[in-house]
């Protein structure tokens, strides 16, 4: 089965380790490689890109390494790709100044 | 290692050929290319520089000359530049007696200076070949840790493995230095936990804020370069994500000092140096701080080496490892896949550092990567 790695129990995203396509069922594994949950993929996701492992509201923080890596610009459902199209940085944003 | 007169130790016995100004680069290059262990520290500056910017370039060239990996130094200058050849020569010679100077305006044209320079370097090489490598305690090591061309594997495997190395080396009395100020943005909470004092933490946070304020005052969005297109293709979405992966290089080790670019790390433990994320500028800052080797993690295959120190490349991206095999020293792809533990990855990194300190060539050295750059902080006014 395809897998994704989640780096802390507070995270709402995991990193997929193989190219995945719509409707793939993948195991989310923690740092000890224990399976923490099973997720159905709802969009094609390339190796190394992130998948939502919880439902995330628009404006909610995206958490990886148990820290904030930015915020969701739109609501994101479990199983969706999380990348620059729906996650934005909150730092160094001179364009917003 | 090789013992220097000032009490420091080098892991290499190189000759540094240091141009004081860009217009003598070709001469320095021709000299260095004739002697295998001679490295040309060519750069585009030395002229039309003022104030702090000139002082910084001077200090960096001085630190490169006096770097413990050099057993001999040849300063090459023209004679009218702001970085005065005689001054730089004297500054380096006071720390490393095996230093010579060729000032072209006092010596002759390109041909004569190249001939003289090669003669000097050949003599240096013969002297250095007689010096024996000696065995010294690992606490004499300062290792720079750096990342470039990061991707999803950097934060899962390469950087945490380097973090384990950092914890081990500092526990054994050694020093680790890191920089890349921009790429700490978003990792402040973690850094706070590593700092031994409020003072060090505030120093680092102020430096991060300075970069962020520049972006904001220029009305630019750092997302144009941070993360870079390569980082994004490699799965990283924001600077915060890149930073949180990058800071794993420190592990749980204590950050004991915050240094300005060009300053030397003196305390056991981890020191932060205020450097840009740019790979060459960061390498310069870390080597100025005393790094005799650089541990460089890369998911995307950054091939560069550095004139002053062996650069050791670690990747955990299997595809890139297969694509650019000869550019890497360590492949930690199995750690990403969970087949090998992070602890054993960290131990592999540690053993590689020990071997390279003992003379084993790193991949970048085998490929003869000898990059160098200065770091300029002011616009060109004149």
Image (cartoon, rainbow, N blue to C red):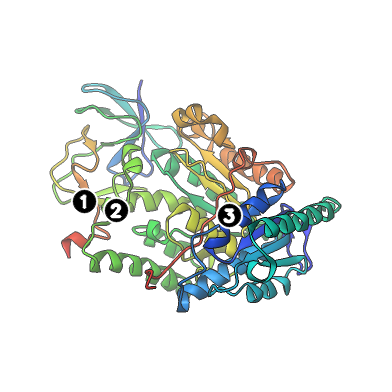
Q: Position of residue B176 (x, y in %)?
A: 58, 58
- Please determine if labels 3 and 1 lie on a single subunit: no
Asked if B310 appears above or below B66 in the picture, the reply is: above
Identify the residue under disc 3.
B26
Is circle 2 on the same chain as circle 3? no
- The chain holding disc 3 is B
**Contact (CB < 8 A) between labels 2 and 3?**
no
Cβ–Cβ below 8 Å for labels 2 and 1? yes
Chain letter of disc 2 in the image: A
Residue B236 appears anywhere in the view = yes
Task: Using the image, tell me which numbered label, if any, was put on residue A68.
Answer: 2
Residue B190, relative to residue B48: is it above or below? above
- Image side of residue B157 versus residue B352, left or right: left
What kind of element bears circle 2? Answer: strand
Residue A10 location, x and y as percent? 32, 47
Find disc 1 in the rendering and name its residue: A71
Foreground label between 2 and 3: 3
At label 3, counting other C-alpha atoms closer than 10 Å, the crowd grade (few under 14, some 14-19, many 20 or more) is some
Q: Quadrant of the N terminus of chain B?
A: bottom right
Q: Within the image, what quadrant is residue B362 found in?
A: top right
- How much space separates mark 2 and mark 1, taking CA atoms? 8 Å
Q: Nearer the viewer, residue B198 or B115?
A: B115
Residue at 38% from the left image edge and 53% from the top image edge: B243
């Amino acid at each position: 089965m395809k897998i994704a790695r989640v780096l802390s129990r507070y995270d709402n995203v995991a990193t997929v380790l193989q190219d995945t396509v719509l409707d793939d069922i993948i195991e989310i594994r923690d740092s000890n490689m224990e399976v923490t949950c099973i997720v159905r993929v709802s969009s094609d996701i390339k190796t190394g890109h992130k998948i939502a492992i919880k439902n995330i509201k628009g404006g909610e923080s995206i958490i990886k390494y148990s820290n904030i890596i930015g915020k969701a610009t739109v609501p994101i459902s479990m199983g969706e790709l999380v990348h620059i199209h729906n996650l934005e940085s909150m730092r160094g944003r001179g364009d917003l100044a | 290692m090789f013992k220097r007169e000032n009490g420091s130790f080098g892991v290499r016995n190189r000759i540094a050929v240091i141009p004081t100004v860009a217009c003598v680069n070709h001469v320095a290059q021709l000299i260095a290319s004739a002697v295998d262990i001679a490295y040309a520290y060519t750069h585009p500056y030395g002229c039309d520089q003022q104030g702090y910017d000139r002082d910084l370039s001077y200090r960096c060239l001085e630190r490169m000359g006096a770097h413990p990996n050099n057993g001999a130094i040849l300063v090459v200058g023209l004679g009218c530049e702001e970085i005065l050849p005689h001054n730089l020569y004297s500054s380096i010679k006071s720390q490393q007696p095996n230093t010579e100077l060729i000032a072209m305006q006092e010596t002759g044209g390109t041909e004569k200076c190249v001939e003289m320079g090669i003669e000097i370097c050949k003599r240096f090489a013969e002297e250095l070949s007689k010096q024996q490598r000696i065995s010294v305690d690992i606490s004499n090591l300062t290792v720079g840790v750096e990342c470039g061309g990061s991707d999803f594997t950097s934060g899962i495997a390469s950087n945490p493995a380097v973090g384990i190395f950092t914890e081990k080396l500092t526990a054994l009395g050694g020093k680790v230095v890191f920089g890349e100020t921009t790429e700490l943005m978003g990792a402040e909470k973690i850094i706070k936990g590593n700092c031994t004092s409020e003072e060090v933490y505030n120093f680092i946070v102020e430096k991060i804020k300075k970069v962020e304020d520049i972006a904001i005052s220029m009305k630019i969005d750092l997302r144009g370069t941070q993360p870079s297109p390569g980082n994004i293709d490699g799965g990283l979405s924001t600077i915060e994500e890149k930073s949180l992966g990058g800071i794993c290089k420190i592990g749980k080790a204590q950050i004991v000092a915050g240094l300005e670019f060009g300053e030397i790390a003196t305390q056991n433990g981890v020191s932060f140096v205020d450097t840009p994320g740019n790979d060459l500028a960061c390498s310069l800052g870390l080597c100025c701080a005393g790094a005799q080797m650089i541990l460089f993690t890369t998911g995307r295959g950054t091939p560069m080496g550095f004139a002053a120190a062996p650069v050791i490349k670690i990747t955990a991206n299997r595809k890139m490892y297969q694509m650019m095999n000869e550019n890497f020293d360590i492949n930690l792809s199995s750690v990403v896949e969970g087949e090998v533990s992070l602890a054993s990855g960290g131990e592999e990194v540690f053993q590689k550092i020990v071997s390279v300190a003992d003379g084993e060539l790193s991949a970048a050295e085998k490929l003869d990567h000898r990059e160098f750059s200065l770091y300029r902080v002011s616009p060109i006014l004149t």
